[in-house]
Image (tube, rainbow, N blue to C red):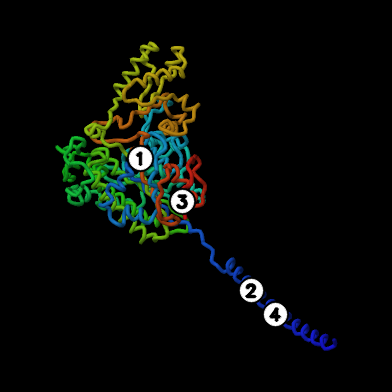
Amino acid sequence: MRTFETSYDEETNTFLKWAVTIYRINTYFMKRVLYITSLSLLCFFSCTPKKQAPTKPKLVVGIVIDQMRYDYLTRFASKYGADGFQRLLNNGFSLENAHYNYMPTYTAVGHTSIYTGATPTNHGVISNNWYDKKEKKSIYCVDDNSYQTIGSAGDAGKKSPKRLVTTTITDQLRLAQNMRGKTIGIALKDRSAILPVGHTANAAYWFHGGNEGVWVSSSFYMNSLPTWVQEFNKNGTANDYLNQPWETLYDIETYTESIADDNNFEQVFEGEAKPVFPHDIKELRKTNKNYSLLKAIPAGNSFTTDFAKAAIKHEQLGMSDATDFLAISYSSPDYVGHIFGVASKEIEDTYIRLDNDLADLFRFLDKQVGKDNYTLFLTADHAAVEVPSYLQSVKIPANYFSYTAFKAHLNKATKRLFKSELIIENVSNFQIFLDKEKIASLHLDSDQVAQKIADVAMEYPAIYKAVTARTLQTTTFTHGILHTLQNGYNQKFSGDVLLVPSPATVSYPKKGTTHGSGYSYDTHVPIIFYGNGIQQGSSKKKYEITDIAPTLANLLQIEFPNGNTGKIIEEVLE
């Protein structure tokens, strides 16, 4: 018994020793595991570098191409080089289903909507020219006799953005930086230079043709042209471009993306017998207002690029600790499109050459500002319809609208309905303005008269929709053509009856083309973002032109323009 107990105690003692040893070993390893785990977690949260938000760009460049359809990106793609449009498409972010969300789609309205993030309902620019109900006359969007021309003795610079009633993204950038940073607008057209840069710009420059051929501005911005502008105006560049013939950049036989050069759907320059290549520009300038001809040929784009590069260099854009903004508009494609149409050899050559101009500009920005120091967007102020007479020739419905015949139709109806031909005060921009005083003198109700006239307008063959202003004030259209019409309606400035023409119906000569509708051929435009803070890729989601400004505002971390109705395009931003 004693032996058993002794043996048991020894075994127990040995067992306990092993247990203690194992416990100590486990504890040691557990502590090591916990220690290593703690270090790993600490390193994960404190040692791993956090992803830094991209720094703000030193320069934002807005590029608007006047009358560029989206399909110009794809139709002429095989002719583009690697450094122009393709550079933006390959390294930037392209919105393939971007549209204008209002009508009328005109130059002044487009530029304003891009930079305000708003439609005419809010920003107040309802056309290029429109009938002023108060002044009882047609007015031009940027005319302002309060200011004087800077750089010329004529009236070309008596301009300002006074009819723009909201701020622009460029205004907001200046405000956010306590008026530091420069904002400059450049375009051959005055409205395309003035409206994008808003009310606070340092400068806006546009081209005055005729026999002068100089870049001018307004006393709204400055008292005299900077020395570099004066020197540019004297350097003979405009004259050099006009002394060269306009020939196709490549063999014309390779321009298979456009119709025959000699056709019956294109206008001609004054002094030409046929709308065919080559165009003798040196000779044609004599009969086409001399330097003004530069606007209507591809060299106008090259000339604009030259001036933009001079502005970047001499104004030292992108060189300060504040963000600068350069708004460039290429106006020449619009002139070429109006004259020759969207399927012409001329429009194809214009875009091939513009691609080279863009490549030149991008390379200059890389060198002057730095590849990572600028953000750029490219879009258009509207697109354009195929020449309606050409559409008719291939059996596609299209039509022409005569304001004279239409107004006669209305007057005949008002005489029958109201015993007066003086009720219609003005018909323009597919809007009808009523003479309210005359209606009151006839003891008629203006809303009832407007509805009757809308009904009469619907009887006219080329009119697809007719809606009274009262209807637009009291009804919300959420989609379709009436939605775009409503977005273009401004209660203070628009007419009493608004019209929508049938598809491919224009008020224009039967040669050449135009724009202005709310149909996709006028609304579908490219929108491409590129550079600092921009993702690489593309999207097929539908976006609207008013989305550009708030997206830029978010990138720059500034307030939206004060009339903004657009939304941030999140997938564009890093």
Q: Check whether the beta carbons of the residues at disc 4 and disc 1 lie within 8 A of each other.
A: no
Residue 295, image x and y in percent?
A: 27, 43
Residue indicated by mark 2: 33
Residue indicated by mark 1: 382
Front disc: 1 or 3: 3
Quadrant housing residue 289:
top left
Q: Amino acid at mark 4?
A: Ile
Q: From mark 4 to mark 1, how far is it between C-alphas?
A: 81 Å
Q: Check whether the beta carbons of the residues at disc 2 and disc 4 lie within 8 A of each other.
A: no
> Image height check: is 204 above or below 439?
below
> Image height check: is 272 above or below 8?
above
The local secondary structure at tag 3 comes to: helix
Q: Amino acid at mark 3?
A: Glu
Q: Nearer the viewer, residue 119 or 537?
A: 537
Q: Which mark is residue 304?
A: none
Residue indicated by mark 4: 22
Q: Which mark is residue 571?
A: 3
